[in-house]
Image (cartoon, rainbow, N blue to C red):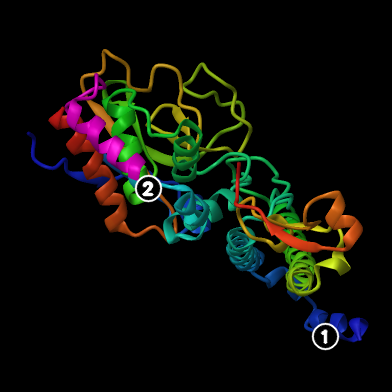
Amino acid sequence: MPELAQSHIREGGQDRTSLLRRDVDEAAARRSLREQIAHLERQLSALFTSAHPRRGLEWQVRAPGGPRLLGMGELEALRDDLAARVEDARRTLRDRAYVETRNRERIEEMMVEPERFKWVRISNDDIGEPGCKHWHARPRLGLIGMLMGWWRVKISSGCP
Amino acid sequence: MEAEAPLRRGWVEPALRAEFPGLALVLAEVAAGAGRSPRGVKERLRHLSDVTHGARALAQRREPIASAYRIFFRQIGIDPENFRPPGEAAMLERMRAGRFKSRNTLDDALTVAVVETGVAVRGFDAARIEGDLGVRVSQPGEKLGGDGLELPDGTIVIADERHAVALIFGDTAPERGVSPETARTLLCAVQVGGVPDISVEEALWICSDILTSS
């Protein structure tokens, strides 16, 4: 229906689009974009805090450079980049949380049946915890234990 | 010791006020420059170093004032991961150096203020500022301090009645900062939306108290 709408606007012999307060519209749009940026920044900060101690996540968002008043296009691009970064961080954390849960379950299984997990080593890093503790399925008494099938889970005492 | 320095508000260009309704510049002038920090200030820094730890640094960006500065940084085109807001920068420096290092009364006062309140304060040599300070957008071809770095068009600056004297967050024009010859320091806090007045006032009072009692 765009033709119909346009003909309606032109009724009365003048182009009424010129009467629109473009400055007010733009100010409202800019305000809305700034609010969206603020909301996304808060979400990104919350994700950053909850991600600790996991490493290797990307937190930088391409910035147009400042300090200056950004144009509408720049605000939109910044909003989109922030949204993409938040989504990316969320997805990565979700994937890691899944792997970490599986690793926790694996530790429990290792403790019950260490012989099923020969030489498997799971660290705090693998379960999203700080510190250097790790669980290592190894044979008792070295070679003899390996030949006899005497396996156990050795839990490290922490950071060296 | 002097009575609390009276606070006043700097001007803000209407276009900036419309864009950032919470933006303000709060000023306080004190009859002191920068010198060697007395023992009490060094002890205060040491105490702050002791109570500041990694967990606080990590969670800082979720605190309301630090978050307000981060958001403002984003909105003016700065990535706060690259160029840290002053509160976060101070905290990272503490983590890197293992303590808040004492430098001089002004730097120490600014550090104490930003760590205790989260509000960014900076100092100018009051004798080199013409008229009152305010925040505005730079003009095409304008230079920082009149003869310094050329400012990209539209840069948000702190300015006196003649020149841009500093970027709103960042470089200060040559000779506008506090030097050993400074007799009066103009303290200036940049307030953004979400930062309460009381925190800004407290930050400036902390600075003026340290400077005037040293």
Can residue B144 be seen in the rendering of this structure? yes
- Classify residue B179 as left or right of residue A153: left
Can residue B30 be seen in the rendering of this structure? no
Q: Position of residue A116 (x, y in %)?
A: 88, 69
The chain that hosts pointer 2 is B
Give residue A71's mark: none
Residue A160 shown in magenta: no
In 3D space, how far apart are the residues under numbered discs 1 and 2 (Cα atoms)?
A: 54 Å
Q: Position of residue B130 (x, y in %)?
A: 32, 26
Question: Looking at the picture, does residue A93 appear above or below residue B121?
Answer: below
Q: Nearer the viewer, residue B190 or B18?
A: B190
Q: Which residues are magenta?
A: B29-50
Identify which residue is drawn at 65% across, 49% down: A70
For label 1, the SS is helix
Residue B39 shown in magenta: yes
Q: Amino acid at mark 2?
A: Val
* Nearest-to-viewer mark from 1 and 2: 2
Q: Are marks 1 and 2 on the same chain?
A: no
Give residue A8's mark: 1
Q: Amino acid at mark 1?
A: His
Q: Which residue is mark 2?
A: B119
Question: Looking at the picture, does residue A43 appear above or below residue B138?
Answer: below
Quadrant location, the N terminus of chain B: top left
For label 2, the SS is loop
Identify which residue is drawn at 54% across, 41% down: B84
- Classify residue A141 as left or right of residue B121: right
